Amino acid sequence: MLTATYILVSLSVEQASIRMSLLAFQKYMQVQLRQQSRLSLAQLQYAGDWLNRLYQGGYWRKVEMYLIPAMRQATPHADGLLNGLLDELNGLNHAALESINVVQQRAGATLDCSEQQSEQLCAAIDAFCTALLQRLEKEERELFALARKVIVGEAWFAIAYQFLAHDAQVREARRGRAQVLPFILPVPVPASGTPGGAIATTGIARTSAEDALPGMPPSLLAQA
C-alpha cells in the first residue's frame, strides 16, 4: 500500500536525522576528550545535559507517538512477537539511560575529571550512542517490517493523517519562533586594510541544523 510506504519512508528520514545527531555528538565529545586529559565540572555537566536531551528526544519521535500505539491497537491481545520486540527496544533504552546516570553521577561527585575518569566518560558516551543506534537499526529492520503485517487498511490512513497534523504543528511552531529581521543600515565599503569578509551576519535566521540541535557548538553543527 502506498500509504504504508509513505509512512515508513517518513519514519526512515526521521531515523536518519536522529542517527546523524548521535554520531555528531559522539564525534564532538571524542575530539574534546582527546584534546584534554582533564575535564572541568562544566564540561561534565554539558555532556550529561546533551545525553539527556538526545535521550528525551526519542520519546517525541513519530515511531513512539504514532506507530507503536497503532501496532498495539492492531494487536489488542497479547502478541508475543510484538511484545518481545518492544521489550528488546526498551532494554536498549534502559542501557542508554544507565550511561546518562554514569555521566551525571560523575559530574555531581567531583569538581575535576582525571585522565582515567575522562576515559570512563568517553566509554559511557560511546555506550549511550551505541545503544540508541542499535535501537534505531532494530526498529528499521524488525519493527517496520512487523508494522506492515499487523497494521491493515484504514489504520494506515489514520497514521498518515496524524503525521500530516504533526508536521503542520512543527511548521507552525517554527514560524512562531522566527524573529522579524531588524532594519540594518547598508554596510559601508571596508576601508583599506580591513578584511572584506568581515561583514556582520547578525539577524540571520538559524539554520535547520541549529533548529534540530539547539545549543550545539558550531563545530558540531558543521560536522552534523
Image (cartoon, rainbow, N blue to C red):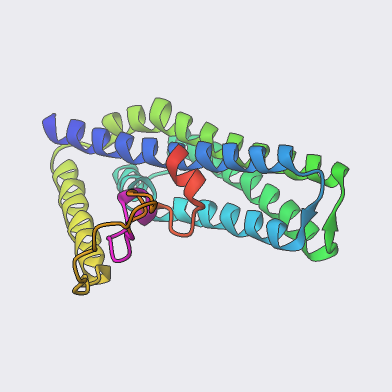
Q: Position of residue 220 (x, y in %)?
A: 50, 44
Q: Position of residue 188 (x, y in %)?
A: 24, 63
Q: Please identify the quadrant where the N terminus is shown.
A: top left
Residue 107 is at least partly visible in this image: yes
Q: Nearer the viewer, residue 56 or 42?
A: 42
Q: Position of residue 93 (x, y in %)?
A: 57, 45
Q: Does 12 appear above or below 58? A: above
Q: Check if residue 1 falls in the magenta segment.
A: no
Is residue 156 shown left or right of residue 128?
Answer: left
Q: Which residue is pictured at 20% across the width and 66% down the height?
A: 175
Q: Position of residue 170 (x, y in %)?
A: 25, 60
Is residue 217 shown left or right of residue 118?
Answer: left
Q: Nearer the viewer, residue 7 or 17?
A: 17
Q: Which residue is pictured at 76% across the width and 62% down the height?
A: 41
Q: Nearer the viewer, residue 184 or 6?
A: 184
Q: Which span is picked out in magenta?
A: 200-211
Magenta-highlighted stretch: main secondary structure? loop
Q: Which residue is pictured at 27% across the width and 69% down the height?
A: 177
Q: Quadrant of residue 35?
A: top right
Q: Please identify the quadrant where the C terminus is shown.
A: top left
Q: Nearer the viewer, residue 127 or 36?
A: 36
Q: Which residue is pictured at 68% across the width and 61% down the height?
A: 45
Residue 92 is at least partly visible in this image: no
Q: Does 110 appear above or below 84? A: below
Is residue 43 shown left or right of residue 212?
Answer: right
Q: Quadrant of residue 106?
A: bottom right
